Amino acid sequence: YGELGQGNTTASYVPVQVKDSEGTGFLRNVIHIGAAPNSAYAVTADGAVYAWGLNNYGRLSVGDTTNRKLPTRVVTKNTEGAIVPVENATKVYGMLQNCTIILSDGTVIGAGRNDNGELGTNNTTQYNYAVKNVILENVVDIATGTDHYLALTKDGDVYAGGYNGYGQLGNGR
């Protein structure tokens, strides 16, 4: 699907440096990386987020569901409803069919499959651009499972969301 970020779908038996969005240079100044089955993500020092690989359910958050063989800017909607690049990101995480991003102010946004509320939007709508988690604030770290997540706040509180078929949300249900 292009998850190696080389502009192709060829396997590599040795590590290869991820190319830039044009495929002519390399992705630089990366401060955080994330991966999921068949997709990959990176945050750069300027707060931009890039994604590449399999894009089913819009999990790359690039505004559509087309697979990407090179890093592509992750997008969201601004207050006027226009699609714009994500800015001020600090971390990015992949789940089975979605992604989650922490912004510098501690808010959380994400995109992709949302059948079990994995995006924290209080609905089950699928999004191909990043949308805000309606509950989480002051988040400093996230751990992801297949279809659920744990979020750690700066105060040391832990929140969980998404699929809970085996009690993985820790809410007694």
Image (spheres, helix red, strand yellow):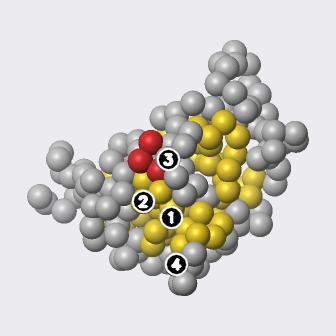
Q: Mark 1 points at which residue?
A: 130
Above or below, 27 relative to 89: above
Q: Is mark 4 on a helix, strand or loop?
A: loop
Residue 45: quarter of image? bottom right
Which residue is pictured at 47% across the width and 57% down the height?
128
Q: Quadrant of the C terminus?
A: bottom left
Q: What element carries label 2?
A: strand
Q: Name the residue under label 3.
A: 65
Residue 171: quarter of image? bottom left
Which residue is pictured at 22% across the width and 58% down the height?
170
Q: How far apart are marks 3 and 1 (CA)?
A: 13 Å
Of tags 4 and 1, the one toward the viewer is 4
The numbered dot on residue 127 is: 2
Q: Are marks 4 and 3 in contact (CB under 8 Å)?
A: no
Q: Are marks 2 and 1 in contact (CB under 8 Å)?
A: yes
Q: Are marks 4 and 2 in contact (CB under 8 Å)?
A: no
Residue 92 location, x and y as percent?
A: 57, 56
Local packing at callout 2 (Cα closer than 10 Å; few below 14, some 14-19, many 20+) is many
Earlier residue among tags 4 and 2: 4
Q: Name the residue under label 4.
A: 81
In the orientation shown, which residue stands out farthest toward the left? 173
Q: In which quarter of the image is the N terminus?
A: top right
Q: Do the residues labelled 3 and 1 touch (CB within 8 Å)?
A: no
Amino acid type indicated by mark 2: Tyr
Q: What element carries label 3?
A: loop
Amino acid type indicated by mark 1: Ala
Local packing at callout 3 (Cα closer than 10 Å; few below 14, some 14-19, many 20+) is some
Earlier residue among tags 4 and 1: 4
Q: What element carries label 1?
A: strand
